Image (spheres, rainbow, N blue to C red):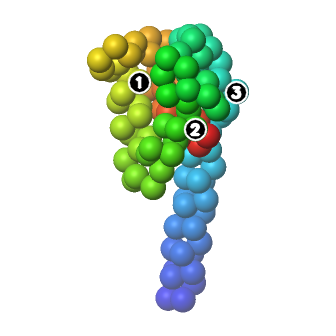
Amino acid sequence: MKLKHALAIASILTMGLAGTAAAEVDAKAAQALAKAEKCTKCHDVEKDKKGPSFKSLAAKYKGKADAVATMTKFLQTGPNDHAAISKGDEAAIKNLAAWILAQ
């Protein structure tokens, strides 16, 4: 019985570590998508331009559990005068959102 318990704990820990690795941001891919979508025309990592800096957006959403989901939805729908991301699949857009929020 102890062996089954130990194996169950080991598999839970292994799945948890695998989930962490999958959640890492691919900065190069995010920057490439931002460039392809011309995000940097209005946004900069450090400075406000026509739109807010990525750092200020990250500060705005810091500590919010749904930050990546909220940012992903915003990027996909393009509300108000913001253009929606047209290139890349949902995973690429989610990666871009996570990268912005990591600034």
Residue 52 image label: none
Residue holding disc 1: 75
Between marks 2 and 3, how big is the CA–CA gap?
17 Å
Nearest the eye: 10 or 40? 40
Q: Secondary structure at mark 2?
A: helix
Sequence-wise, the earlier of marks 2 and 3 is 3
| Residue that carries the numbered disc 2 in the rendered image | 55
Report the residue at 61% width, 40% height from top.
Answer: 103
For the point 35% across and 18% down, the residue is 78
Determine whether, in the image, residue 69 is placed left or right of residue 54. left
Nearer the observer: mark 1 or 2; the answer is 2
Give SS at disc 1: helix
Q: CA distance from mark 3 to mark 1?
A: 18 Å
- Which marked residue is nearer to the observer: mark 3 or mark 1? 1
Q: In the image, 59: left or right of 75?
A: right
Q: Which mark is residue 28?
A: 3
- Identify the mark nearer the N-term, 1 or 2: 2
Name which residue type carries label 1: Leu
Q: Is residue 87 above or below residue 46?
A: above
Foreground residue among 6 and 40: 40
On the image, the x and y values in percent for residue 72 come to 41, 31
